[in-house]
Image (cartoon, rainbow, N blue to C red):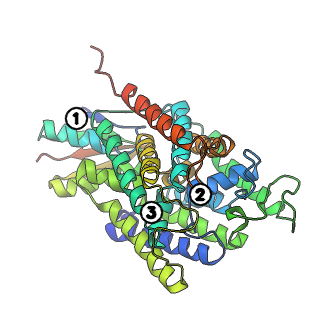
Amino acid sequence: MAVAVDARGLNCPQPLMMVMEAMKKDPGPLTVLVDSESAVESIARNLKREKRTLDISRSGSDVTLNIGPK
Amino acid sequence: MANSFFASTKGVIAAGLVIGASAAVLQKLGNPANMGLCVACFGRDVSGALGLHRAEIVQYARPEIFGLVLGAFTAALCSGEFRPRIGSNPLIRFFLGALVGIGALIFLGCPWRALLRLAGGDLNAIAGLLGLTVGVGIGAFFTRRNFTLGSSQNSNRILGLAFVLFMAALLVIRIAYPPIEGQPKNDLLFYSQTGPGSQYAPLWASLVLALLIGWVGQRSRFCSIGAIQNLFLFRQSHLLFGVAGFVVAAFGLNLVFGQFHPGFEKQPIAHTLQFWNFFGLVVVGFGSALAGGCPGRQLFMAGEGDGDAGVFILGLLLGLAMAHNWGLASSGAGLGAHGAAAGIISAVLILFIAAVGLKKPAAA
């Protein structure tokens, strides 16, 4: 799956902002790349409210978030 | 990697309680009134101790500043989150730090101290906290329109230790060069003989509590700016619970210690010019929001290896020093000679940064 949002290296709250905007545009699945645990946590926290699934995989400092469809 | 407790709402509340309680205890142990912990005030004292400004009443190499970074560094290292990175427009972050410092000294405190002043009964803090909210709100307006300072890149793991080692070096100097009774300066460091700079908790108490605060701050992502910002942008109150914990703990212990004195007049290290209390923290809220965190959070992030946050802190130290050199800082008597002009110029400059930092549409 292609990465739709690459928020690596961006400070708070930009990663979450980008994810929320992407989810607003498209209710389908979304792949997000981030590199800070605080971004992972804040995105996970908001996804709980959105009732979307989240699958996290790590490789080095990169964290790939596979977000399920609405 | 597992951070389930501190990532939870209970966790951030616990962190807020620890930080707020530590601040009240530090005041009880000797730190200035309603200033158990203040990144702006203590940064200013550090600048003074290094001789970057000559306001004789505010010179002391506060171990809290160094300990916050070192505690966050230790936590980041233990959790595998220490990751050196830099390059998200460090120069602009340097100036944002300086402007935030100037704004903070117009109000007389960073956002944490605004909360501590409130928890100590200083009602002038209310105007400041309203200003902080407005400032963060303006920042959120620009964030929503894709303001960005750009991406940072991972950097060399050893060179990425630079800021942490700098803080450690200043701490070693503070320990190795203690104050000499009755002397305003030892070989290296200035020490205030009177005023807020002469009021401090014992070195080891300051250091141990600061390490603890740095630890829980890093784990929980505690941030006063983020608390307000997330409410505006995402209707999310997670961090705000942490801030509530901070205020509750400080307030409770202030009552126990007899440190609660409600009122507007004659509050310690505070003035009653409500417009400027408000405006000073508009500058702080706006500038910090653009930089991605309050001054305290910048210290935590610097400990995680975020070089851009370290640069923000260096800018903050310079801004705080210049605020005293140029008469921009307020005092209990009111505004500094050029405080009003400095506040307005700072706000205009941050607005300029925000406006030109809006992301341009991607080139085709």
**Coordinates of residue B140 in the picture (x, y in percent):** 31, 42
Q: Which mark is residue B124?
A: 3
Q: Is residue A67 left or right of residue A10?
A: left
Same chain shared by disc 1 and disc 2: no
Q: Is residue B56 left or right of residue B160?
A: right
Q: Secondary structure at mark 2?
A: loop
Q: Are marks 1 and 3 in contact (CB under 8 Å)?
A: no
Residue B154 seen in the current view? no
Q: Is residue B180 above or below residue B41?
A: below
Task: Give me the residue at 47% from left, 37% from top.
Answer: B344
Task: Give me the residue at 54% from left, 74% from top.
Answer: B24
Q: Which mark is residue B110?
A: none
Q: Which residue is mark 1?
A: A1
Q: Is residue B8 above or below residue B41?
A: below
Task: Give me the residue at 60% from left, 73% from top.
Answer: B27
Q: Which mark is residue B333?
A: 2
Residue B215 seen in the current view? yes
- Specify the amino acid type for callout 2: Ala
- Specify the amino acid type for callout 3: Asn
Direction bottom: furthest residue: B256
- Specify the amino acid type for callout 1: Met
Q: In this view of the protein, which residue sits in the foreground, B15 or B124?
A: B124
* The C terminus of chain B lies in quadrant: top left
Q: Are marks 2 and 3 in contact (CB under 8 Å)?
A: no
Q: In this view of the protein, which residue sits in the foreground, B8 or B179?
A: B179
**Coordinates of residue A6 in the picture (x, y in percent):** 33, 34
Task: Give me the residue at 45% from left, 45% from top.
Answer: B288
